[in-house]
Image: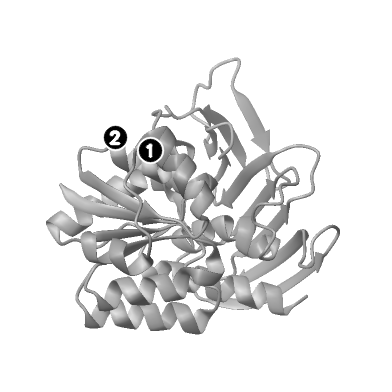
Amino acid sequence: MLKVGVLGAGHLGKIHLKLLNQSSKYELIGFYDADENNAKKIVKEFGYQYFSTVSELINAVEVVDIVTPTLSHFDCAKEAVTAGKHIFIEKPITKTVNEAVAIRTLVSQYHIKGQVGHVERFNPAFTAVKGLIDSPMFIETHRLAEFNPRGTDVPVVLDLMIHDIDIILSVVNSKVKNVHASGVSVISETPDIANARIEFENGCVANLTASRISMKNMRKTRFFQKDAYISVDFLEKKSEVVKMKDVPENPDEFAMILQNAEGVKKQIYFENPTIENNNAILDELETFADAINNDTTPIVTLNDATKALKVAQQIIDCF
């Protein structure tokens, strides 16, 4: 079991603490939180060991799980890495691309592992269809959330849209060519709603919308590719695959058949992949333990997260 400690015990930090405490791959040593009153409440309720400084916690563990506000990710990660500790960092990796590159360089120099918490990669609705996504040419995403003051210290692009940016970059095998975007600040000092268009060198186009001032929650992505349409509902954990194939000689009488202007006929097939229930946060943490123990590449690398942050920054720069 890997000795692990958590930096940051806010809403998400408490979830990480609970899951790491349950995991058979980690031994939870304790946590640090800048809010001493909050820390005392957690100690009283759960009995986790509290460390009074970041350094004390880092020195006591092998793996540091960084769930602090984004603004402090760089400092926490730098101290952990230079102490020779493996790091798991919540998304976004850091506040700036330069910070992300610096952490990526340090991790390489100190020969330790790093992973970033782009948790939607582990969403069962996505993993069920990921193998079917092949050279998509148009992608549309909607990530809408009801207003919550938590997270408003960063633009909605870094708070919400970055999940979809990472997913898109993981399935589009091409470099980003152009980025266009607009954003509006409604309640916060930074944009609360944003729309972005990402154009890739291979011709793929992705249209992303993110809002944290919606009346309802939504997390949907649609992938369009040759002869197929794939829909992923990250919130409801549902997927649908619609395929178009050549019409067989003797089609079923209930078959859905389309004919284009040139007379070519295609039959439509609907598939609903089996969704395996999982805890995506536990999965991302435990696959990181596997990467450390087996000396393999983490599923979401620091390089992946840096690329996502770079695109997110390009979007923000358009505002």
Q: Is residue 121 visible?
A: yes
Q: Nearer the viewer, residue 265 or 108?
A: 108
Kind of residue at badge 1: Lys
Q: Which mark is residue 98?
A: none
Q: Residue at x 71, y 55 (%)?
A: 210
Give residue 221's position: percent from left, percent from top: 61, 47
For the C terminus, the image quarter is: bottom right
> x and y percent of residue 160 in the render?
63, 55
Q: Is residue 250 above or below residue 63?
A: above
Q: Residues within 10 Å of mark 2 (few under 14, many from 20)?
A: few
> Total number of numbered labels?
2
Instruction: Locate residue 7: give its quadrant.
Output: bottom left
Task: Please report contact status of discs 1 and 2: CB closer than 8 Å, yes or no.
Answer: yes
Q: Which residue is mark 1?
A: 18
- Position of residue 278 measured from the top left corner of the image (x, y, whole percent): 39, 32
Q: Left or right: where does residue 27 sit relative to residue 299?
A: left
Q: State the SS at label 1.
A: helix
Q: Nearer the viewer, residue 304 or 267?
A: 304
Residue 16, placed above or below residue 182: above
Residue that protrudes farthest toward the top in the picture = 253
**Could you say which is closer to the camera, residue 92 or residue 73?**
73
Left or right of 315: which side holds 266?
left
Picture quadrant of residue 220? top right
- Residue identified by numbered label 2: 22
Q: Give the residue type at disc 2.
A: Gln
Please report the residue visible at 67 percent of the width from the left and 48 percent of the height from the top: 143
Query: What is the CA distance from the residue labelled 1 to the residue labelled 2?
Result: 6 Å
Q: Secondary structure at mark 2?
A: helix
